[in-house]
Amino acid sequence: MHHNKDREILHHFDPTKVETLIDLMEEYFQTGVFGGGNLGKAMKIILRAKEEGAKIFMSVAGAMVPGGMRKAIGTAMTTGMVDLIVTTGAVITHDLIEAFGVPHLKFLKHENDSELRERGIDRVYDAYVQEDGFPNLEDHIGKLIDHFFEKFNENGQLVTSSHEFLKWLGSKITDNESIVRIAYDQGIPIFVPVIADSVLGLQIWLKSQFKRIIVDEMRDLTVIQDLFHESPKTMALMLGGGVPKNYMLQSSLMSNKEYEYGVAITMDRVETGGLSGATLTEAVSWGKFTWEAPKVTVYSDVTIAFPLLVSAWRQYKSK
Amino acid sequence: MHHNKDREILHHFDPTKVETLIDLMEEYFQTGVFGGGNLGKAMKIILRAKEEGAKIFMSVAGAMVPGGMRKAIGTAMTTGMVDLIVTTGAVITHDLIEAFGVPHLKFLKHENDSELRERGIDRVYDAYVQEDGFPNLEDHIGKLIDHFFEKFNENGQLVTSSHEFLKWLGSKITDNESIVRIAYDQGIPIFVPVIADSVLGLQIWLKSQFKRIIVDEMRDLTVIQDLFHESPKTMALMLGGGVPKNYMLQSSLMSNKEYEYGVAITMDRVETGGLSGATLTEAVSWGKFTWEAPKVTVYSDVTIAFPLLVSAWRQYKSK
Amino acid sequence: MHHNKDREILHHFDPTKVETLIDLMEEYFQTGVFGGGNLGKAMKIILRAKEEGAKIFMSVAGAMVPGGMRKAIGTAMTTGMVDLIVTTGAVITHDLIEAFGVPHLKFLKHENDSELRERGIDRVYDAYVQEDGFPNLEDHIGKLIDHFFEKFNENGQLVTSSHEFLKWLGSKITDNESIVRIAYDQGIPIFVPVIADSVLGLQIWLKSQFKRIIVDEMRDLTVIQDLFHESPKTMALMLGGGVPKNYMLQSSLMSNKEYEYGVAITMDRVETGGLSGATLTEAVSWGKFTWEAPKVTVYSDVTIAFPLLVSAWRQYKSK
Amino acid sequence: MHHNKDREILHHFDPTKVETLIDLMEEYFQTGVFGGGNLGKAMKIILRAKEEGAKIFMSVAGAMVPGGMRKAIGTAMTTGMVDLIVTTGAVITHDLIEAFGVPHLKFLKHENDSELRERGIDRVYDAYVQEDGFPNLEDHIGKLIDHFFEKFNENGQLVTSSHEFLKWLGSKITDNESIVRIAYDQGIPIFVPVIADSVLGLQIWLKSQFKRIIVDEMRDLTVIQDLFHESPKTMALMLGGGVPKNYMLQSSLMSNKEYEYGVAITMDRVETGGLSGATLTEAVSWGKFTWEAPKVTVYSDVTIAFPLLVSAWRQYKSK
């Protein structure tokens, strides 16, 4: 009776079976229920998507660079785990702050936000941008924007887009741990649906007061939709929600096909009704996923689940 | 001893004192602790900001129109509670679906998302877009975009922005409950930092394949920053997080002043480190709020707290 | 087509229709979707349960007295809204602290927890127990326990239970805003499944070192199950989760009937798999609710939703 | 300047450095910020507590056995990671269901809760108790309670407590993966502050209708407080919140010492004001932790973080 085909005996996660990260993920997967089970399913969906030749499009929201995820994202790119990135201007801004030589900080002794303000230090939960982070970024990026404009303007007007600018920028970054640089090296397109929504965007805007720089939202749309359309099979891997998640998923709407695999990692709630916490099943009604698509939401802090998935992915891959 | 100036006796919320919505908000405020206390503080900050001549900039994320908040947002505009709106393309898209004659739906009997897909019905948690909602939107909006282009293009090229397009669109909408129409009537600017991230945006993109329509992110930045700069005092009222929250708050960064009042209503968590759940105190370190600014985060479903605040605001105002 | 019997047009919450608290709840109810809709449904379920002669059993977890909810709970009892309470030792302990003359505090200027420790002040989020709160409680309650023992022991041994002790205690409390006193006056039984888990319980334990006082868990079980069994119809109203929620719901398990109405107000998540966040539908599989029972979970801070429901209940009742 | 003693350069989690689970935890720890950083700190606090001779008291709330955590809890006991457990009646009930031969289930095809009810299957999120789980438990446990009573009653009356009963029960369980059995074998006391709040408790209650069985809450209090008092150094490890967390922490209140290490893993929120989500710093004001105690809250699904910590602990230990 326990072996009906619609039911399975619950496996308990067994730490004594865990020597490697592969063992760890297998135990999560075999457990199969609650949050740990979903983490295991997420790993399997990524592996299966790659085995079946799918491209993985990854959306990234939240303060992932101040949160210490820069190399995890980088490794996901260098190891062939992800093939396209949709993210926020803030993720790119913080990547560039480090690329131009100023690391983020942890504080051993907290100060209040008023004192930080006076010292020019910006706080991101328990991480910090140090005093010279933004001024140094502004110096470097200002010159690069000038350079970009001089090179690509036509008759004094430059119409560009986030992925065009970031691709060129990647070719100029020397820090080989930079997300933007790795993306360039690996041929991975980065889309920032609204680069204006960041300090990087404000720097472009500043230049646009003097030089006719136009960041056209429509140009990115053409490219991401073409890339989705050309990809025989596509997986959506979502770190957090927000615009990156919505923008990535909507790239399927004008196409006659859907995402065929899905993994979302988020702390957002389904009950608010917003897209950030919405189930991937709801997305089926919109034609963003097939009904049959293997898909799972892992309700977890991304900084716990994502680096674990990338680390384990490396081990599965080298088996 | 109970009357030290650094401490106060806790007041218990007293339902027997509550006849009106004003009484209700006063009881929340006097209670002053936990979530209810914060809701009362939010009301008082809104009232004080308005008394002191502040403009209220409101960011709106999440599926507020499918969630039944269209008139609450509308009333906040018609009663002078809010003076500027930053929102998502989805909020505008769903507003337009109704403006063009197709209401959203509640279902009394749920179906699964696969069946909904087949019937062309899109689900947003427990609300729905009916079959003809999007086709009807596409018909109407397609013609309006053509009209907009014909009117404003220069030599076959039109460079525009979300607030320009939405202002013009507002003048063409006949539904006087439409957020876009009310904004036009009241002279309230609406900013959608990334209109491309919505079905409305996809329709503009479709037209841009045939007509040279450019939606330039930089144009909105100029206008919102000017409006912030010109406003003698400004309050940030945030419904949810995401790009609308960040974009609105960053409008102070290039200025030599900060937001002086703040109310955030959200279910997002501070512990993920993302901006959506970040405290308003953290924003002080970035120079987005003054240290002294009255500010509070209400951890609540927006569809509970916001219509209550708007309803109570009307009563305070008419006292 | 919009009027199929399985679908309804979405009503938008209309603040211009809201003059009274009844109007407010009707607008939430008519909106019917997302969190605000669920709050409206909760009100209607309470009203319907009472109209149909149901007893309302209410579980109360969380720091409701420091959170300013003492009078809201009291009013729910004096107005006939609730008929039985299951709660924690902490709720009763904080009620007694006030009953014996020491109010809770709000601080206008925060101190760190180490300084509070030195000053003998205990913190509960942003509420506080002042220096003499616990010593004063211990004096009073110690004497009352002696008195209780002298009166009810048999041959030097007293076997009692939470509801017996609290009923007697209610008769001795002079503060007529006390939850324990109001419960006594109104004949509303209070159950604390584990009174040992509180400062009140530690005081009983201290006495039990000198006098043979036995708090028998089994005695309460008999009484609450009998009360459930005798109630023709019963509603479960749950403020938070934890032991009070589980204990109250399990009172139906040994019976041949179920709870017939349910309202849960909580911030707990369904995805952790724990009972605190579990849906009321899951409880159907356990035989705790009927499948047909009107039931809803409101994902809200209790200190926002509960006093609003009690305040509105008073107005509906006096219509 | 980057090397001030109050600040450190942020380390980014580096998946290319991760071969073993120890590497994984070291990377989390070195990252040191956001959720991942807190998970790393939790590991280090456990290791340090054990190195410094502390006893680890662990509270366990939530449906950990249906959630697949039975062996993870078991391994934490057999490897010397935990020294005392405070949990719910439900955790023990589900452990016993399996101990008496009936495993929990996963379903490959979901049914609705009404159909499950008809088939006698109880749901716990996405895990299930199969048809014969409870009847079989009731048979076995009924006989064991009879046996326990016959052995320990004095003149027809038996006054007992959760830890006494569970210790004896452990000696009778043959399933060597049972939490109750392992606890007996390892000499690890289990406390269930309110055994009445569970199906196990209801079975004891049933027997108490025929035999004078008294479960005295005060007896457990004496023992746990003595164990806390006798432990030279004590760490609190909290899986979820609720009564187990509060009960375990309050065991320090009557003592002149505090917990000296703390790790909490929870999805509960601090903003509701309840103890379940309260910070460990708040507990300092109550004298439950020292101000200096290394302590951290990991905001994570327990079924993700806990088995990972146990698996890594095994590897650190065998180094």
Image (spheres, coloured by chain):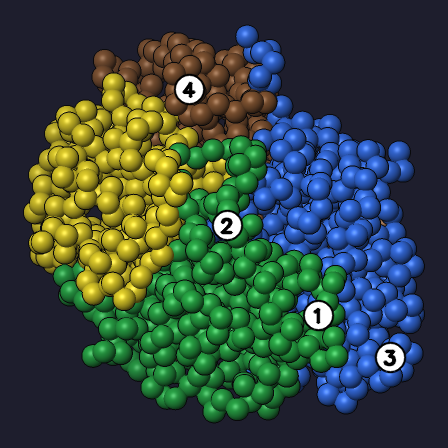
Chain colours: A yellow, B brown, C blue, D green
* Mark earlier in primary sequence (1, 2): 2
**What residue sits right under mark 2 in the picture?**
D133
As drawn, D263 above or below B182 = below
Q: Can you identify the residue that label 3 sits on? A: C153
Residue D213: assigned label: 1
Q: In this view, does D78 lie above or below C87?
A: below
| Residue pictured at 26% horizontal, 30% vertical | A259
The label nearer to you, 4 versus 3, is 3
| Disc 1: CA contacts within 10 A as few (<14), some (14-19) or many (>=20) | many
Q: Nearer the viewer, residue D186 or D73?
A: D186
Q: Which residue shows up at 60% across the image and 18% down it?
A: C8
Tag 4: amino acid: Glu
Q: Dot 1 falls on which chain?
A: D
* Spatial CA span between label 1 and label 3: 18 Å
Kindly report the distance in space between the C-alpha atoms of the residues bearing marks 4 and 2: 36 Å
Looking at the rendered structure, whether the residues under marks 1 and 2 are on a common chain is answered as yes
Quarter containing the C terminus of chain B: top right
